[in-house]
Image (tube, rainbow, N blue to C red):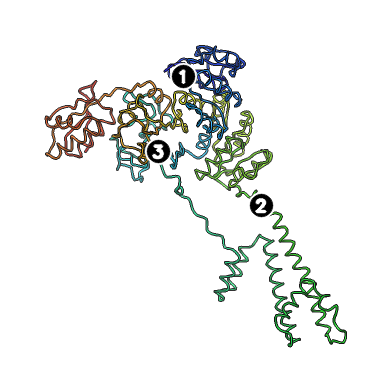
Amino acid sequence: MSDHFLVCGLGSLGQHCVANLKTFGVKVSAIELVKPAHWEVPDLPNLLEKLLVGDCCQNDVLLAAGVECCRAILLVTDNQRVNLEAALAARVLNPSIRLVVRSDKENLNQVLGAQLDNFVAFEPSQLSASAFALAAAGDNLLGYFQVGGYRFKVIKRRINPDHRWCDRRQLNEIDNRRRRLLRHFAVHPEGLSPTQISDSTDPSSASAQFYTWLPNTTVRAGDTVITLEVEPAREPLVGEQKKAPRRSLMQYLFRMLTQWQTWPRSIAAFWRVSYGQQIRRVAILCGLTIFALVIIGTGLFWLYYPRIPLPDAFYATVTLLLGGYGDLFGDLNPTDPLPWWIRLFSLSLTLAGTAFIGVLYALLTEKLLTIKFQFLTRRPPVPQRHHAVIIGLGQVGRRVMSTLKDLQQPAVAITGHEVDAEVLPQLPIIVGETATALEQANLHSAKSIIAVGEDEVQNLEMGLMAYRANPRCRLIIRAYDQRFSDKVAQLFPYARVLCASALSAEAFAGAAFGENVLSLFPLYNQTILVTQYTIEAADTLSGLLLSEMAYGYGVVPILYQHPGSADALMPSDDTRLQEGDRLLVLATIRGLRRIEQGKRVHQQWQVAIARALTQDAQFDGASEIACVAGCDISEARRFMENLPGTFPKKLYRHQALRLVRQLLKRQVQARMIAINHPNLTVFQRE
């Protein structure tokens, strides 16, 4: 394939894309409408093969930049229309070019992805939103992403003496089908935290982030353990509680009728539950009053006129309550004897009915007029404490709110503009001036403040103002310029300043090589890319064991699927990759570069076997060697028949340690030795 790439748009994102592409050792050219006045990435022009000033939508400009011989084009200008138009123009000029487009039009991106081969679209704010949410969620949750029907979380644990792993587990025993160990920091004698420990590259590991620990290390008190854990997304999250069903009026009435002995206590309880809902209380009083008047009126009329049926007495009372005094007494024969108190009582019924039924009509009308608006605009109340306050409700703010909701983290958003009722309807939102809204957001008891507006200077202003009111909270500020981020971080060390362009540029760079980057999150000063591979016959992964891929390229396989089979979470190291397999890995940009270039680190270990204690141990030992080392079973059996000896195949450190552990379990005496240091022997504790 060609090693030439083209970047259109040299804003903050474009410059970081160029810098990341150059780490792959490829040629990069760029097109910009106006030459930037300053460079956010130092010495960027010297990294470029060509720098053209012009419109990237014009065919002659694209041809001058060499689009015909480019492997991929990254269209990352601030104008989405320009990006899409230039993408179509580039595809016409080079039908095989890979298109990496900056766009937040999800529907359009899906349609174009289905219609155009080798096309992928991202939006920096969408990629980086999870980083802002994780920064606010707390120190123990370092990463979070969803893939298909699974939730993945990166969790940090500080081991205390009472922890079930302390002095009982080795690091290799932490892994299972739902959990994978990512990092381990042993307790440091000087009391340094993991963030203060140097991340220098381990010569025996392909990654400075992964596999820097020894599997046979025992977990001690004070250690810090970082794990990746998975759970099905369809299951309720840990700690989620179902709300108790709210009792309705009919439920209370049914209980009162079936348990008449508890009427006084039930009425008092219902009245306490309804306290504060004045409209309901007024409606209940009016209804009870009308019901009592109907009973009294029906009884009086039936007693005074025993010749009329009881239903007629009831209908006469209801007619009077509905204002029908004239209908009953207007046409009466004056010769009929009517006591004065009957007329007075009838008039009282009419007046009382007019008053109380009129109140019920008014309440019903108000309810009907407002129920639609109440249904659309009703939001939960503002959290009282230990919550996140999001300042700004743009694309990033909305995604941060949604992510915090998925993580069961209470949050409230502040915005200066009216928000449609369908926007995050189940989350609290305060509309108004930021200074006033901060008081309503219970800032004094908030856990974190996230300023993610569209203006980085305003984000800094609002963030510092909020931090001054609550210096105990965690402050996260969104920035657009890496130089601005670095300066703010130096002046205000308590603030965590995240540059969305710098975070997402690695995803754009990885996608330019054909990788399917699904998500990303920061981990100890590096960006971890959640990348999906589909194994092809001619790529650098076909035919490898997962152990060879993981330890050789410095990535962490977390999901494997063979065509026609179910997903395998945290797959076994003994799985061999075949054409058509789907694989999900965690990788840094360095790991993606190694896979792209096919540069695996060298295996530096071998396993020396002294003897097998039994005949069955000899047979089982051969099977373990074939599985872990990935060799033919006949070769392993021939070796086991001629012990003692050193198995000739070279292995990675973790791979060799695992083989020694498995052999010791099978009653085979084994040890691992370093190839470059024959006198260095590592024994595995039984």
Numbered mark located on residue 71 in the image: 1
From mark 1 to mark 3, how far is it between C-alphas? 34 Å
Q: Please give the name of the residue rendered at 59% of the width and 63% of the height, measured from the top-left corner.
A: 248
Q: Earlier in the sequence, mark 2 or mark 3?
A: 3
Query: In the visual, does 207 lie left or right of 680?
Result: right
* Quarter assignment of residue 310: bottom right
Q: Nearer the viewer, residue 489 or 500?
A: 500
Query: In the visual, does 671 lie left or right of 63?
Result: left
- Label 1: which secondary element: loop
* Quarter assignment of residue 646: top left
Residue 206 visible: yes
Residue marked by disc 3? 228
From mark 2 to mark 3, how far is it between C-alphas? 42 Å
- Label 2: which secondary element: helix
Query: In the visual, does 215 lie left or right of 29?
Result: left
The image position of residue 552, as x and y in percent, is: 33, 26
Identity, as a three-letter code, of the amino acid under mark 2: Gln
Q: Nearer the viewer, residue 89 or 411?
A: 89
Residue marked by disc 2? 374
* Quarter assignment of residue 587: top left
Mark 3, residues whose alpha carbon is within 10 Å: few (<14), some, or many (≥20)? many
Identity, as a three-letter code, of the amino acid under mark 3: Leu
The image position of residue 150, as x and y in percent, is: 43, 42
- Label 3: which secondary element: strand
